[in-house]
């Protein structure tokens, strides 16, 4: 049974930082592409970042502010978010996929339950 459990969300002021974590179980973690997506209120789910092996990919809107990383020994992927903006407010989802990196949600096979990030102005 595959489980992805996110943590680390919360309320932060604009310009602040948060680090999200996603702990995976039931998968051969190191061989999976791990991604972060987000969904704001009334919006579609959008790609944020992904990591496959040591290669990283970012949406233009977060490039230079967010950093994705993984610790295969802990089966955990992280999203360090700096210089947060109110428009970063969303539910953030962790995803795992067996295929190559993709920016579309249907590229990924498994999803976490999401963690809320709220950035106040």
Image: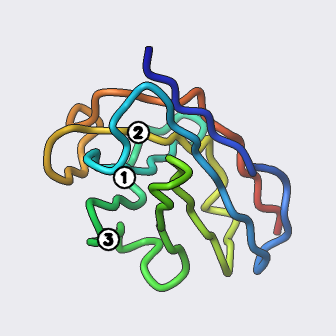
Rendered residue at 66%/78% (across/down): 82
Residue denoted by label 1? 47
Note whether 120 is above or below 3 in the view shown: below
Q: Residue furthest left?
A: 100
Rendered residue at 85%/69% (across/down): 13
Callout 1: few (<14), some (14-19), or many (20+) C-alpha neighbours within 10 Å? many
Q: Quadrant of residue 54?
A: bottom left
Note whether 18 is above or below 98 in the view shown: below
Rendered residue at 29%/28% (across/down): 109
Q: Nearer the viewer, residue 31 or 15?
A: 31
Q: Residue 38 vs residue 49: left or right?
A: right
Residue 96 placement (x, y as % from top left) = 35, 39
Residue denoted by label 3? 56
Q: Residue 117 vs residue 105: left or right?
A: right
Callout 3: few (<14), some (14-19), or many (20+) C-alpha neighbours within 10 Å? some
Indicate which disc, 3 or 1, sits on the residue closer to the N terminus.
Answer: 1
Where does the C terminus fall, quadrant-wise?
Answer: bottom right
Q: Which mark is residue 95?
A: 2
- Number of marks in the rendered image: 3
Residue 1 placement (x, y as % from top left) = 44, 14
Q: Are marks 1 and 2 in contact (CB under 8 Å)?
A: no
Q: Are marks 3 and 2 in contact (CB under 8 Å)?
A: no
Residue 27 placement (x, y as % from top left) = 37, 31
Residue 55 placement (x, y as % from top left) = 26, 72
Indicate which disc, 1 or 2, sits on the residue closer to the N terminus.
Answer: 1
User: CA gap, disc 1 to disc 2?
Assistant: 10 Å
């Amino acid at each position: 049974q595959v489980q992805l459990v996110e943590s680390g969300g919360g309320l932060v002021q604009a310009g602040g930082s948060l680090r999200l974590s996603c702990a995976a179980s039931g998968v051969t973690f190191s061989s999976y592409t791990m991604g972060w997506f987000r969904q704001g209120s009334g919006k579609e789910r959008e790609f944020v970042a992904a990591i496959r092996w040591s290669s990283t990919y970012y949406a233009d809107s977060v490039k230079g502010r967010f950093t994705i990383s993984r610790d295969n020994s802990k089966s955990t992927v992280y999203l360090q978010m700096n210089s947060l903006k109110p428009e970063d407010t969303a539910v953030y989802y962790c995803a795992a996929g067996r295929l190559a990196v993709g920016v579309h949600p249907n590229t990924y096979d498994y999803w976490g339950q999401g963690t809320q990030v709220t950035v106040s102005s």
